[in-house]
Image: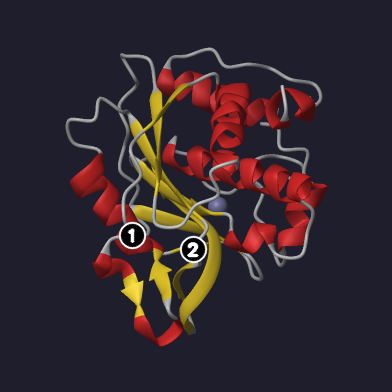
Amino acid sequence: MRRLVATAAIAIAIAIATLATARPAAAAPTTVCVVPLGKFDAKLVPIIRRGIAYIYGFETRLLPARAMPAAAFYKPRKRWRADAILEFLNASVLPDSGCTIVMGFTREDISTTKPPFEDWGILGLGQIGGTASVVSSFRASRGVARSKAAMRTVKVVNHELGHVLGMDHGGEPGCVMNDAAGTVKTIDKEPGLLCPNERSFVEDHHEIVIPAHVTFEWQTVLSP
Ligand SMILES: [Zn+2]
């Protein structure tokens, strides 16, 4: 069983299961593969790839776009179950891809179960210590300027990647792994940077050195 954590748009991010899968220290360079799923915002793709490289220093690769997996469709709300998307990514995209981590990226609405809610819309879902995550720009983009939507999306991407790299939610506001705790607007207040303890965690657990930034130079990620 893997542990899944969602970043909810309107409520706290949630953990679904409790058993973390230990992830071995990466012997090879980490390659994060981005796979567009269903309808997606093509202009955001290079931005999230630069955002991943900026924060983690990882190589990214763009995989061919795929249709949303039919098994993930949640008919009552006409949206897509993030847990089923992760299963699809692990079973049908990751094998033989050469990728260390795969991230689905879509502008379709995605959801998961957050008791007592059977189906709860979310910004993203990542497996703690796993290999897959999915991020939707749907909720991050509603009613805001494109630059703000892009910044939110980059922050969510790096948050979900943090889960995949083994991190749970930290208690500190201002850190990438801080919980969205109530509203997507929480994300707007976050600088989008790893805090020193988060950087140390990733470096120690994956035997890598990752960039240290004092401020987020958004220009280099949004429009270099
Ligand atoms: Zn989270």
Q: Position of residue 180 (x, y in %)?
A: 67, 57
Give the quadrant of the N terminus. Answer: bottom left
Name the residue located 71 percent from the left edge and 61 percent from the top edge: 184
> For mark 2, does the 10 Å Cα neighbourhood hold few (<14), some (14 to 19), or many (20 or more) residues?
many
Does 90 appear above or below 142? above
Tell me the quarter of the picture where residue 63 sits: top left
Name the residue located 23 percent from the left edge and 30 percent from the top edge: 97
- Is there a contact, CB below 8 Å, between mark 1 and mark 2? yes
| Side of 107 where 143 appears, left or right | right
Say whether residue 177 is visible.
Answer: no
| Side of 182 where 91 appears, left or right | left
Does 13 appear above or below 53? below
Location of mark 2 (residue): 108
Q: CA distance from mark 1 to mark 2?
A: 9 Å
| Amino acid tagged 1 | Met
Display colour scheme:
secondary structure
Q: Is residue 160 or residue 196 the one in the foreground?
A: 160
Does 71 appear above or below 40? below
Q: Secondary structure under badge 2?
A: loop
**Residue furthest to the bottom:** 76
Q: Which labelled disc corresponds to residue 68?
A: 1
Tell me the quarter of the picture where residue 34 sits: top left
> For mark 1, does the 10 Å Cα neighbourhood hold few (<14), some (14 to 19), or many (20 or more) residues?
some
Label 1 CB-ligand 1 distance < 8 A: no
